[in-house]
Amino acid sequence: DIQMTQSPSSLSASVGDRVTITCRASQSVSNYLNWYQQKPGYAPKLLIYATTGLLRGVPSRFSGSGSGTDFTLTITSLQPEDFATYYCQQSFRDLTFGGGTKVEIK
Amino acid sequence: QITLKESGPTLVKPTQTLTLTCTFSGFSLTTSGVGVGWIRQPPGKALEWLALIYGNDDKSYSPSLKSRLIITKDTSKNQVVLTMTNMDPVDTATYYCAHKYGSGSYIGMDVWGQGTTVTVSS
């Protein structure tokens, strides 16, 4: 099985901050890496597909990068609606989600 | 517009079999690139992928749960059914079904149901 490890597990940030979340795979997943946002009581929302592809309607302050085993999700200027938990997910072999990163208000 | 909705029991006893139904609209699950998956989330914990079925009836399962899962589809009813045997309290979770984004080999889930909460308790 491919394991996905996210760091940090939680972070505190202020509106306007630049936030970076990392995701590491236990083996190469090429660019088969997606990012989701989940707010309490709601289903996850797919933000970024195939490492860098922003889904329609997702603000451009979200971006993804990486390849192989190391990936990042960056939010360039954190907005109030961005406080949520973020998950990475690989689909190189089966599907595996990371443990999540909770972005909280400082 | 694509929509999905999960249905099934809210409470099951240990050792029982869970059957969940995902009823969808806005797409047809009859071509190879189209897929529907099941994902669960225990309270306060991370997401866990369970199974995926494609329009050509190809299926894939979580390796750790494969022996307990069966996923099927009924295209005439626009439904996908997940069966999980030998339920245990650790299987208590919100169960989601979701639509596979795009038709290629990359697998991301772009539209999700609201989720259904299943509690396993005697």
Image: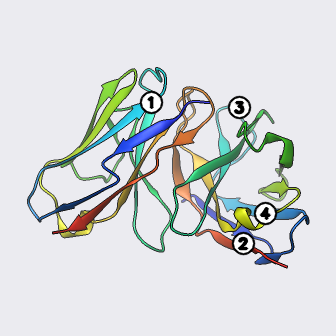
Cα distance between the residues tagged 4 and 1:
32 Å
Q: Which of marks 3 and 4 is in front?
A: 4
Query: Is residue B59 in view from this perspective?
Result: yes
Q: Do badges 4 and 1 share one subunit?
A: no
Residues at marks 1 and 3, CA–CA distance in whole angstroms: 28 Å
Q: Nearer the viewer, mark 4 or mark 1?
A: 1
Q: Is residue B60 left or right of residue A55?
A: right
Q: Position of residue A52 (x, y in %)?
A: 32, 33
Between B29 and A37, the one lying in front of the other is A37
- Image point 90% across, 62% down: which residue? B17
Where in the figure is residue A14, as x and y percent of width and height? 12, 65
Chain containing the residue with disc 2: B
What is the chain letter for disc 4? B
Question: How many other residues sit within 10 Å of disc 2, few (<14), some (14-19) or many (≥20)?
Answer: many
> What residue is shown with label 4?
B21
Q: Which chain carries label 1?
A: A
**Callout in the foreground (2, 4):** 2
Q: What element carries label 3?
A: loop
Residue pointed to by mark 1: A25
For marks 2 and 3 on the same chain, the one whose residue lies earlier in the sequence: 3
- Chain of the residue where label 3 is placed in the rendered structure: B
Q: Which of marks 3 and 4 is nearer the N terminus?
A: 4
Q: What residue type is labelled 1?
A: Ala
Label 3, on which residue?
Answer: B32
Q: Position of residue B62 (x, y in %)?
A: 70, 40
Q: Is residue A66 left or right of residue B41?
A: left
Q: Quadrant of the C terminus of chain B?
A: bottom right
Q: What residue type is labelled 3?
A: Ser
Pointer 3 with pointer 4, Cβ within 8 A: no
